Image (cartoon, rainbow, N blue to C red):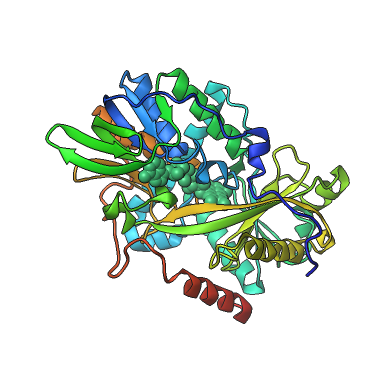
Amino acid sequence: MTADPQPFKETPYWWEAAPRPELAETPLAETTDVAIVGAGFAGLSAALVLARAGRTVHVLEKDRVGEGASSRNGGIASGNIKMGFAKMIDQFGEARARAIFGEGVEARDDLARFIEDEGIDCGFSMTGRFTGAFRRHHYDRLAREAEFLNKHLDIGAEMVSRADQHREIGTDLYHGGVIRPDIGGLHPGLLHQGILERALEAGAVVHGGTEVTGLRPEADGVEVATNRGTLRARDVLVCTNGYTGKVTPWLRRRVVPIPSQIIATEPLGAETMARLMPKGRMLGETRNTYHYYRPSPDGTRIVFGGRAGAGTDDPKVKFRHLKKGLVEVFPELRDVGITHSWWGLTGYTFDFLPKAVTHDGIHYATGFNGSGVVWARWFAIKAAHKILGNRSNAQSAFDGFEFQTRPLYTGHPWFLPAVIAWYGWKDRLGF
Ligand SMILES: Cc1cc2nc3c(=O)[nH]c(=O)nc-3n(C[C@H](O)[C@H](O)[C@H](O)COP(=O)(O)OP(=O)(O)OC[C@H]3O[C@@H](n4cnc5c(N)ncnc54)[C@H](O)[C@@H]3O)c2cc1C
């Protein structure tokens, strides 16, 4: 591997087009109908629904607004859950599995409709996603899954042989792969900015630099302590996902923060982009320490992400892992310049299912398992409808699953380096 030739920005590439907003500092109100903790996709989506329904809403964000995962992610819009459909049927039965899958389709369609109706210019496109088989036997597994999905859900998944692979991606690393036409991509920074603007227009008050330090449920509401004072809210919705901290210990025992890292290349030229990513699709692969990647929405550069290096906080080590991954897929990019390298935290649940739940008088929308572009908005809206008392809109196929924790887990994922090392070994041994 070559040394990296130039320094890179440690902020997301997405912030070039969508810089962190500078919101005027407004005093904290004494009371509000709803206080929302966290100003990512989830918090702001709930705020929009609640404000349009006439509620007073205060969104409290400890950092700059959108500093969390919502403006840092890969922008891949799937609405999938981290469990194959066949396994879902085994675990939950066919009717429930179909309902869960169907809700993913509904959530993704709803996001597309929202972007269209609100005129949010975030480059959303149903590009489809190609997933490369890292081992020969992975191709057979993908083919079985595609057949199953097509038979049960008619999604039009299509296998691509190794011989035809260059139609999809300019690499020989994979043993062919599968196209899922039902997955798209967008610019997450611009989507976040669009939701923020709509929420502000609807009357929500969004406070950056406001850390919630205490939540005390009372008979008719919740006392919310912050670093800028205290307010009383009739309802509180916590949308902190991978950034969940000590202020919500119950949630902290149930969400596992897992880092994910992305690099963006310098502009590569139209000819190179057309050769490496001829269809402009979202891209992924089957290895356990997998990479996800894509062209930037303007098609000029590659945005390449993964979990390699998740065991360290050192941005340079993380960078080296990812650059190595990029060169493995596209050897011709060995000497390409990297302009941005950044990371953020995803929030996983122990059953890999996202949640909109209420516990001890506090509402939570969380646990998007690395797929929050579609799910964060969706589950936050479910939680908002619950607060509004709209029972039918609040219902979900995910209702009723226990929000699990594990003995000895208090919010610090001490087991992560071992799990990642194990996944790396599995990849090297060919599983
Ligand atoms: C590198 C990366 C790549 C990803 N790629 C994809 C992808 O391609 N597709 C996909 O679907 N998903 C992806 N994800 C996941 C997706 O970004 C998240 O699921 C989603 O953004 C979660 O949104 P959220 O609003 O729940 O949380 P966030 O956007 O993380 O916001 C939570 C906020 O809560 C704030 N907060 C925490 N504690 C407090 C407190 N006490 N007081 C006030 N504020 C607080 C934090 O500062 C943070 O801003 C990726 C994530 C990362 C990090």
The answer to whether 131 appears left or right of 329 in the picture is left
**Residue extending furthest front?**
228
**Residue extending furthest right?**
271
User: In this orientation, which residue lies closer to the viewer: 89 or 83?
Assistant: 83
Q: Position of residue 280 (x, y in %)?
A: 73, 44
Q: Split into 4 quadrants, where in the image is the C terminus?
A: bottom right
User: In this orientation, which residue lies closer to the viewer: 118 or 196?
Assistant: 196
Q: Position of residue 210 (x, y in %)?
A: 40, 36
Residue 154 seen in this snapshot:
no
Q: How many numbered tags mark residues here? A: 0
Against 366, residue 176 (above or below) is below
Against 19, residue 304 (above or below) is below
Q: Which residue is at 53% across, 22% downward? A: 118
Q: Position of residue 13 (x, y in %)?
A: 67, 43
Q: Which residue is at 58% across, 74% downward? A: 424
Residue 240 position by quadrant: top left
Residue 201 seen in this snapshot:
yes
Q: Position of residue 40 (x, y in %)?
A: 46, 39
Q: Which residue is at 59% across, 66% downward? A: 309
The answer to whether 408 appears left or right of 3 in the picture is left
**Residue extending furthest bottom?**
429
